[in-house]
Image (cartoon, rainbow, N blue to C red):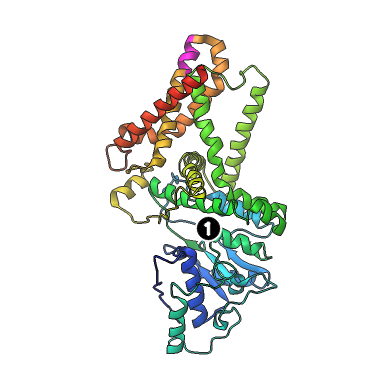
Amino acid sequence: MPNLIYVSREKSRTSPHNFKAGALNVLIRVSATMTNAPIILTVDCDTYSNDPQTPLRVLCYLSNPEVGYIQFPQRFHGINKNDIYGCEFKRWFKINPAGFDGLSGPTYAGTGCFFRRRFFFGGPSKLVLPEMVELGPDNVVNKPIQSQEVLDLAHHVAGCNYENRTQWGNKVGLRYGSLVEDYVTSYRLQCKGWKSIFCNPKRAAFYGDAPISLIDVLNQNKRWAIGLLEVAFSKYCPLTFGTRSMGLLMGLGYSHIAFWSIWSIPVTIYAFLPQLALLNGVTIFPKVSEPWFILYLILFLGAYGQDLLDFVIEGGTFQKWWNDQRMWLIRSLSCLLFGLLEYILKFLGISTISFHVTSKVLEDEQSKRYEQGVFEFGVHSPMFVTLIMAAITNLAALVWGLVLAILGGKSAFEENFMQVILAAFAVVNCKPIYGAMLVRSNKGGIPIKTTMLSTFFAFSLFVVAFITLRN
């Protein structure tokens, strides 16, 4: 390694670009003053290289002048046997990128990605030159890295106020305006004509760390959800701007990611409405003997069957898939729902976004519980309240539905079958929550405050539903 340069970035409370995109733009500028190498690799601080042949694979792809970056899938070491938090994100990091690869290429995933430096300066055929010639992608550095002139320039372009009244973050470098700088940068520059490549060799190119507590997972995902909504409801909305610039399929592909948190709406409805209706004696699904019941059954089994097939083909196991789909439901009822609400409040000027850095610090007891496949709660969080409310409501609905089936005979069984099955499905998925509420005595359990608050809200929700349905 001929040169290793450590950059301690200057920060300021008045600078609006103190997040990851701002830091990466500083590194792009500093590296331009010292070497201006044509290829840039970005990795997270917890990522390490696992295959020395990776740069050679990249050079082959970059022979195509339209290819702006090569994205490798995120892979993680230290994930427990059954990946209880679904941190592998097989759909985002493996399955969906393979589909994108048949079009203009995958999105930038934030780490494990090789860029052509020219990618950050406009489209492949029309570059946007920065305010200083020394920062342009075609500039040749002919001075030693340790020369005073180079060091002075590097300090200058790394300053927290350097970007004021420049095109950085808008037309040059990683793009600002969203908490998900990786998504918005690849999206906007692919709209300008760049293509990308998804490279998924058998031997992992990079390995990184994944959070091992539920609250860290949810905080990380909430930040992603808010950032994606910032793009979805901007003038660069993938449904409109993206479809016009990249075509219908790429526009829909980026839209599928941008509107991720919208899934929280139907999942929340299904987590509460049928169960509250069952508790109040209201039937909302067809009877088992009616033809429409077959349609519901086909849709349910077909959707989950296809999801399981995709997951297994990508090397997953049934247990990992079950944990993954359970985490999809948990995310929808917590971080995605709260991310959607927080974005709406921010849009209305009521609240501001708080940036949460994902903790990767390991504690012995916490690591031991994680390796044993035990869910880690440990702290009070509003995002846990909705989860516990759903767990309590579905358990009550299941018990009441079984009582009705026993006392009411065949007629009651046919009328309430789908609602009882839906409640049973939710109860099985909520098993870790029940354990953390009732059994756990260690630090990873659900605090009593959270349980009591959730129970109160669940009962209040039942009362509201009772009054509404009776009227």
Q: Position of residue 260 (x, y in %)?
A: 56, 46
Let me know if residue 404 is in the magenta part.
yes
Position of the N terminus by quadrant: bottom left
**Which structural element holds mark 1?**
loop
**Is 386 drawn above or below residue 121 in the view shown?**
above
Foreground residue among 355 and 205: 355
Foreground residue among 160 and 148: 160
Foreground residue among 162 and 146: 162
Residue type at the position of mark 1? Ser
Q: Is residue 298 left or right of residue 37?
A: right
Q: Is residue 32 visible?
A: yes
Q: Which residues are magenta?
A: 401-407
Q: Residue at point 53% right, 31% down?
A: 270
Q: Is residue 10 left or right of residue 244?
A: left
Q: Position of residue 335 (x, y in %)?
A: 46, 44
Let me know if residue 52 is in the magenta part.
no
Foreground residue among 291 and 308: 291
Q: Residue 193's quadrant in the figure? A: bottom right
Q: Position of residue 96 (x, y in %)?
A: 61, 51
Q: Which residue is mark 1?
A: 178
Type of secondary structure dominating the magenta stretch: helix
Q: Position of residue 14 (x, y in %)?
A: 42, 66
Q: Is residue 147 visible?
A: no
**Is 167 drawn above or below residue 436 in the view shown?**
below
